[in-house]
Image (cartoon, rainbow, N blue to C red):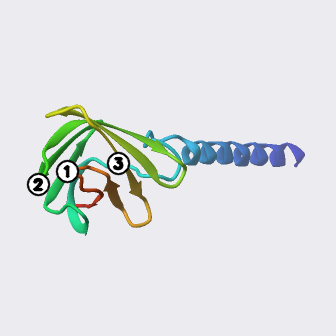
Amino acid sequence: MVANKKIWLGILVMALVFGMTVVGCDDGNGGGGGGGNLDGTWVDTGIGVINGMTLILSGSNYSLTGDMISSGTYTRVSDGKDLDLTFTETSPGSETYTGSYNSKDKIISAAFTYGGQGTVTFSKQ
């Protein structure tokens, strides 16, 4: 009877270990709780100073079209809740822009400056 209980306890422990491994694995999205996959087309929400823009994210690359045209790479750093974004322009210039992804509202706010203007807010299309 004792051996039978040990076998069931062993099976329970193995199931718990497997379950915790699956739940605790890193899915490669850049950190705990923030962001997930941002790839896709993001459109200007009309909130902010600049309007009429589209942001396309693919892997670590971005392109911006509309009132301002820019392309380059971007990086993401998670604070465990939201993502801080840094956009490094490679065309037409070499500017660096900052932004963030708000995981609660699922929007990207970025400080793409255009003629001294400021923040643009995007939502995923």
Q: Residue at x 16, y 54 (%)?
A: 54
- Looking at the picture, how far across and down is residue 120, in whole percent? 27, 59
Three-letter amino acid code at disc 3?
Asn
Q: Which mark is residue 40?
A: none
**Distance between the alpha carbons at the discs numbered 2 and 1:** 8 Å
Three-letter amino acid code at disc 2?
Asp
The residue tagged 2 is 67
The residue nearer to you, when weighing 122 against 57, is 122
The residue nearer to you, when weighing 49 against 22, is 49
Examine the rendered structure and indicate whether residue 105 appears above or below residue 53.
Answer: below
The residue nearer to you, when weighing 21 against 37, is 37
- Looking at the picture, how far across and down is residue 97, in whole percent? 31, 43
Dot 1: what SS?
Answer: loop
- Looking at the picture, how far across and down is residue 30, in whole percent? 45, 41
Labelled pair 2, 1 in contact (Cβ < 8 Å): yes
The residue tagged 3 is 37
Q: Which mark is residue 114?
A: 1
Dot 3: what SS?
Answer: loop
Dot 2: what SS?
Answer: loop
Q: Nearer the viewer, mark 2 or mark 3?
A: 2
Three-letter amino acid code at disc 1?
Tyr
Q: How many marks?
A: 3
